[in-house]
Amino acid sequence: MSTPQLFNSFNESRLLDGLNPQQREAVLYRGQALLIVAGAGSGKTSVLTKRIAHLLGMKEAWPSQILAITFTNKAAAEMRHRVRDLLGGEADGIWLKTFHSACVAILRRESERLGHNPNFTIYDSGDSRAIFKRLIKDLGADLHKLTPGGVSSVISNAKNELIDSEQFSRNIDTSDPVQRAIASIYSSYQGELRRNNAFDFDDLIGETVHLFRAFPAVAAQYQRKFRHILVDEYQDTNHAQYALIRELTKELPAEYSDVDPRTGELLRPASLTVVGDSDQSIYAFRGADIRNIVEFEKDFNGAKTILLEQNYRSTNNILKAANSVIGNNFDRPNKNLWSDKGDGEKIVGYTGYSGHDEAQFIADEINELHSQGIDYRDIAVFYRTNSQTRALEEIFIRSALPYRVVGGTKFYERAEIKDAFGYLVAISNSKDDLALRRILNVPKRGIGDASETQIAKHAEKNNLS
């Protein structure tokens, strides 16, 4: 189906069917900035996808002019699937990506401006820790009890605040040997990334922001391209992600301005729609800044806020308990979740005197449910931290309860998969020393640490990768 055919066959009333008044308002609103405060189970994904479909169906944008950002690949895939259900193949032109994948797409096109080849490697947290482990040893920083995980956390937080290694070094307490060591590691780490033609995950966003600020013409290209920007889970954005959104929604400088072919008027800044809920902000330890959503109306003048309070997932007993807990949060809109599903079963609360006591209570509840004819496979136990599984598993084994722990090592983090990728990366990016180090003795060929060190010294002396 061609784009004109898509628009001609657009059925607005069918698109809006089934939406409650607040959802409908969120789909139809056309101001420059919109905050949709969406409680859990309030149909936010449906609202986002139908808002995109409505923009396209009403001929207010072409698919390539829409940038929709989610936080996980799974969420992006789900939204892409829903938009395809509404629009068919025309949805393929939409930039529906995570923050990181959107930045990768931009950097692949523009990275030479930053001194990188377009075939740069992307290091995951495991790759970064391997470099930190070596640098800590090489720089003697292990004397200060520094660990790869600890150093990684400090440097990641700095990057999320857009603090580069030079600025970090200027801001440290030079009388503190630990801070001096971390600053030295940060500088060496960035140098190794440059030599290896690589970015880590935090760099993907930070370097894109730097690109836009250093090259206004490049920023203007993407400001003209994206006419509508939608961001999911906005309460989980950090400073770097916030800065990226600000760059993309800036007013075009006069020298880079253009005429909107649909209206014949000068292009306005891209419209911004964000969806989030300050009550669901749980990633402060990763750098998420709740102020991004709390101060949205201050940051974007004239912004409108719409509350989605009807819950389609839970009963009122659950929602009343949730409202009582989150009502104590500060700096939050006066949101009250409700449902038309009735009160439902009462919530059972149990306070144990130890982890084993809690686990025994859970095992007893499972036995009771099973005696009522409920299959074990239809029962799930959720826990907050992985450390809690020990007490649960001990009780389950002792009680002869069949169970399985869902999770484990992710596919792309398995050693054999990373080894295979190591060979592919070494072929595609000859500057990547980390990939070469990974495959140097895989399969085993008698190359130990001493030989690897000699090879590395020879390469450095002769300016080789």
Image (cartoon, rainbow, N blue to C red):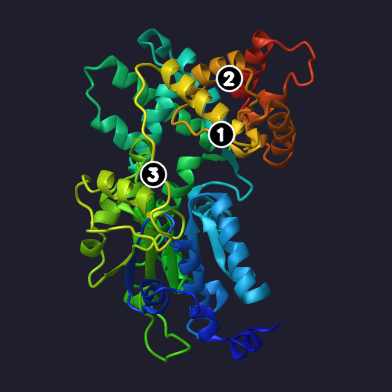
Can residue 465 be seen in the rendering of this structure? Answer: no
Quadrant into which the N terminus falls: bottom right
Q: Residue at x 55, y 46 (%)?
A: 116
Quadrant into which the C terminus falls: top right
- The amino acid on which the numbered mark 1 sits, given as a three-letter code, is Leu
Structural crowding at the residue carrying mark 2, measured as other residues with C-alpha within 10 Å and reported as few (<14), some (14–19) or many (≥20): some
Percent position of residue 358, x then y:
43, 22
Percent position of residue 137, x then y:
48, 13
Precedes in sequence: disc 2 or disc 3: 3
Q: Nearer the viewer, mark 2 or mark 3?
A: 3
- The amino acid on which the numbered mark 2 sits, given as a three-letter code, is Phe
Pick the residue in front: 356 or 370. 370
Disc 2 + disc 3, Cβ < 8 Å: no
Quarter where residue 257 is shown: bottom left
Q: Residue at x 37, y 48 (%)?
A: 318
Disc 1 + disc 3, Cβ < 8 Å: no
Question: Helix, strand or loop at disc 2?
Answer: helix
Which residue position is annotated with label 2?
396
Q: Residue at x 46, y 68 (%)?
A: 47
Which residue position is annotated with label 3?
346
Left or right: where 54 falls relative to 331? right
Which residue position is annotated with label 1?
369
- Give the CA distance from mark 2 to mark 1: 15 Å
Precedes in sequence: disc 1 or disc 3: 3
Q: Residue at x 49, y 17 (%)?
A: 391
Pick the residue in front: 326 or 250. 326
Pick the residue in front: 78 or 123. 78
Percent position of residue 392, x then y:
52, 21
Precedes in sequence: disc 2 or disc 1: 1
